[in-house]
Image: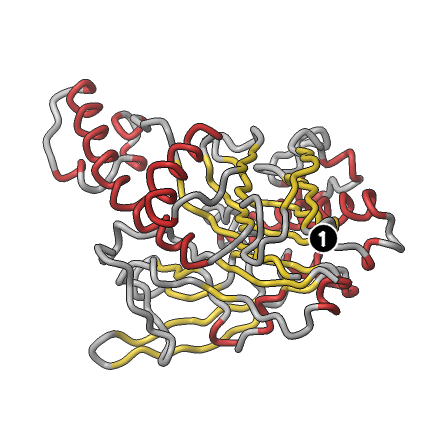
Amino acid sequence: MSVRIATFNIENLMSRFDFSGFRNELQQDRALALFEIEGEAEYRALESARTVALTDDTRQLTALAIAATRADILCLQEVDNLAALKAFEYGYLFKMIGSGYRDKYTSSGNDTRGIDVAVMMRRETAHGEPIEFEDMTSHAHLAYEDFGLFTPELEALGLNPHDRVFRRDCLEVDLRVAGKPLTLYIVHFKAMSPPRNGMDGRTASMPIRIAEAAAVRRIIERRFGPAKAADKRWMICGDLNDYRERVVVGGDAHAGFTFEPVREAGSSIDVLTQGGFCENVVERRPEMDRWTLYHTRGPQERHLCQLDYLFLSPALARSNARAVPDIVRAGQPWRTVFPPGQEVERFPRTGWDRPKASDHCPVAVTIDLV
């Protein structure tokens, strides 16, 4: 029997308005920056109208992307709360695919914006096998000192041993699929920060993600035992905000784009895969076709990279040696530059930059539980 599992950063599924742009121009939406706004009351009214109008189109595209995964179990990042997730599922997904993801779970993590990880699941797989929720454990409260992970690099960032290791959470979800146990670890690691101390944002924030990856590994080893973890059924799913390879985009639409694969010297991803602890199953795809996000700061800085991951335990990787994940890119905005042969038909009403399904692409894989 098989089950299909996906991960998707759905980008700010919020149930709250953010009016901070009135006092902080860096957080003000570019559309409102075009207008002369007399006071905070007017700003709040305009921002509310803009957000509602954009959200409806965005969430239709998000729902289309989720439907395209055909997933039985969906691991999510950037969910405001359970109420927002229920409203989205009922108002958008249900209207599109009918009764589906009836069971939904999330927990309150450490993100200062209040965005959390979550999971939605069907009651049965596509083949009619039961999916049963057994337990859920949040690890948001754990600190660097709980794992012995505090380093001079973290101290240089102004952190302390008692600070929480996860910037959001590592949500441990125990399931049974057709009676067979499966444990999911749903994560959303620290985002790449602005440049500091002469380092680019990825390098400057790397120590935090390295600690998060090491903590996930320790949690799994503590749960199953270092010697037995390889033989258990578990997956790490989520947005790790890091890559160990990327495709650098050069040129332009007139002269033609160029695509150069680049391997990074180091990555927090290595912490999870070293020693065969688990497998990044997306790396079963061709080198140029593993990306889940298009990053750009203008023509001088553009690349495609994998930020969204499905890691299989060694036991699952062995029993699913031919499983290759799918990446749903039809919700990407038109500004995303696709390598030759990878172009897809965009979902209706997708914009140049927005609306879009998300800045990330969903990743889905079908695995057999033997």
Q: Measured from the top left, where is residue 11 in percent x and y?
A: 40, 44
Name the residue rendered at 47%, 40% in the picture: 78
Name the residue rendered at 46%, 61% in the picture: 292
Q: Is residue 121 left or right of residue 253?
A: right
Name the residue rendered at 75%, 69% in the picture: 318
Name the residue rendered at 30%, 65% in the picture: 299
Q: Measured from the top left, where is residue 60 in percent x and y?
A: 30, 47
Q: Measured from the top left, where is residue 345 in percent x and y?
A: 29, 68
Q: Is residue 152 left or right of residue 190?
A: right
User: How busy is the neighbourhood of tag 1: few (under 14 within 10 Å), some, or many (20 plus)?
Assistant: many
Choose between 307 and 193: the one closer to the eye. 307
Look at label 1 and name its amino acid.
Answer: Trp
Q: Is residue 60 left or right of residue 90?
A: left
**Dot 1 corresponds to which residue?**
234
Image colouring:
secondary structure
Dividing the picture into quarters, in which one does residue 322 lie? bottom right
Furthest residue in direction right, as rendered: 227
Choose between 291 and 345: the one closer to the eye. 345
Where the C terminus falls, by quadrant?
bottom right
Asked which secondary structure carries label 1, the reply is: strand
Dividing the picture into quarters, in which one does residue 4 lie? bottom right
Choose between 185 and 123: the one closer to the eye. 123
